[in-house]
Amino acid sequence: MATTPKIGILYTGGTIGMAPTAQGLAPSANLAALAAPYLLDCQVEWHIYTPLIDSSAVNLHHWQDWLTWVAEHLDAYDGLLILHGTDTMAYTANILALAQPNLTKPIVLTGAQWPLQQAHSDAPLNLQTALAALTLPGFHQVAIAFHGQLWRAVGSSKVSTESIDGFATPHFPSLGKWQPENKWSHLKLHTLPAPDDQMQKQPNTSSIIQENVRIHSFVFTPGANIDMITTVLTQQPADGVVLQTYGHGNVPTHPGLMKAIQAATHQARPYSTSVKCHRDALRPCMLKAMLYWVLASSMGVNAIWKRQQPY
């Protein structure tokens, strides 16, 4: 007789659990009771993050807390479900996937465009999809479950603020589709690409993000204020920098900018250039570059990294 899966749930906040207050909608700690009818056929244990947040407020401290929670609880459950606001859910999913490249259990994130207690909310289907993913045989990845679709974490992005099809991985199809009537279809549980050599050399630990890491991110467009960017790089040294650039990673040939980049790399600060892969792939390319270097900056990696191919 099959055992009942034991799932650990980390509720961080976000729209899925919001309720009306005198100050407007705010995350409510009552989500566990509201979600119970959609989390049947498994044993769940809830962990409520304090304080609950709107995901637009997420920072490195939150990521450190959640990575630590994953490290402390993964062994106790058959899988972990993280309930998260949609604005930054893809960022957190990428962080978890990059920090946990050799999982033997699934970690699934989900949220909602509309609160669970609101009529016609997308939350029930999202919760059911997430639970179905957590009990898939042989599924050992970090993924996002949303509107009956399962998306790999790495390269994922929020693609709509209004549609219930809120997430996608532009370079890959979904890992599978789930509906209450038909269960799973179109399953394509690809394994994640092997981490690059630099990532493989790093320890798999929950303490890889330092609380006070400073990351700068700049977008180069025609007419961008190069003097301002140069001044910030020179006078406010960062632990890591993401430069969203042109073509194959080109930046304007500004002497001061070149000098600032050279000086920073000589001082063992990691830099990354993020480029347009093709057409609409700008957002996932930028996303992964930034997340990679948030991690790399706290690991002491020192290099200029260019991602020119889709992933």
Image: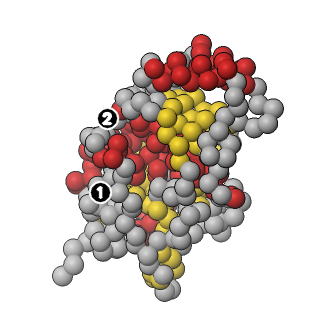
What is the three-letter code of the residue carrying label 1?
Leu
**Element assignment for label 1:** loop
Residue at 53 percent across and 52 percent down: it is 90
Q: Is residue 117 left or right of residue 151?
A: right
- Examine the rendered structure and indicate whether residue 290 appears above or below residue 285: above
Q: Residue furthest right?
A: 223
**Residue linked to disc 2:** 207
Q: What x and y, as percent, mark residue 279?
A: 69, 59
Res. 127 visible in picture: no
Q: Which residue lies furthest to the top in this view?
A: 235
- Examine the rendered structure and indicate whether residue 267 appears above or below residue 164: above
Q: Is residue 209 left or right of residue 117?
A: left
What is the three-letter code of the residue carrying label 2?
Ser
**Foreground: 245 or 60?**
245
**Residue linked to disc 1:** 103
Mark 2 or mark 1: name the one nearer the start of the chain: 1
- Examine the rendered structure and indicate whether residue 268 appears above or below residue 110: above
Q: What x and y, as percent, mark residue 285?
A: 58, 50
